[in-house]
Amino acid sequence: MEHPYTLIRYITDQSKGISIRARVNMLWHVPINPHSLISDGLHLILMDAMGDSIEATVKGPHVHFFLRTLHEGSVYEFSAFSVVKYLENYRATNHPYKLEFQFSTIFHEVTCAAFPCWSLNNNSVDDVSVFKNKSTHLMGLFFFSL
């Protein structure tokens, strides 16, 4: 019998003892200052098989373990994490909550073909202009020349 995984769209701060299966779409860490090797934490964008995304963070001394072990593009099963309301001013996903991984978080890589290769929302310039000064979501820009 397959393990029941919670879809990202159903995660709330009331979610306890859940497991998710997700692809690591992006993984990054930011040094506290440009001359420091110390990071403010590890940030991940996780996407499930339905294409829904949520941000996850790792703080403190566990950053290096997760950074060495997790790889962008790979699919993992995650459990034993906390779910908190996303309170920062700017966010990388539109999910109202984020995951916080701790030392006790359990994860392992799985092979799963059911996942989309990427999670992009394509919007026209007119759609994006509606968000002007109203959205706190980070948007990526692609520049190219012909």
Image (tube, rainbow, N blue to C red):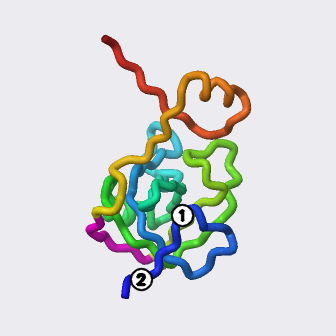
In the image, what residue type sits under mark 1?
Ile
- In the image, residue 20 sits, relative to residue 143, either above or below, namely below
Asked whether 64 or 125 is in front, the reply is 125
Q: How many marks?
A: 2
Q: Main secondary structure of the magenta part?
A: strand
Q: Position of residue 18 (x, y in %)?
A: 54, 78
Asked whether 71 or 97 is in front, the reply is 97
User: Badge 1: how crowded within 10 Å, few (<14), some, or many (20+)?
Assistant: many
Asked whether 121 or 138 is in front, the reply is 121
Q: In this picture, which residue range is highlighted in magenta? A: 106-112
Residue at screen point 47% across, 75% down: 5
- In the image, residue 103 sits, relative to residue 128, either above or below, namely below
- Residue 108 magenta-highlighted: yes
Tell me if residue 103 can be seen.
Answer: no
Q: Position of residue 97 (x, y in %)?
A: 64, 59
User: Badge 2: how crowded within 10 Å, few (<14), some, or many (20+)?
Assistant: few
Spatial CA distance of label 2 from label 1 is: 15 Å
Q: Position of residue 130 (x, y in %)?
A: 68, 27
Q: Which mark is residue 3?
A: 2
In the image, what residue type sits under mark 2?
His
Left or right, residue 75 beside residue 34: left
Secondary element at image label 1? helix
Query: For the view shown, which residue lies furthest in the top direction?
Result: 146
Tell me if residue 11 can be seen.
Answer: yes
- In the image, residue 127 sits, relative to residue 101, either above or below, namely above
Secondary element at image label 2? loop
Left or right, residue 33 beside residue 27: right
Residue at screen point 49% across, 40% down: 121
2 or 1: tag closer to the N-terminus: 2
Residue at screen point 32% across, 54% down: 73
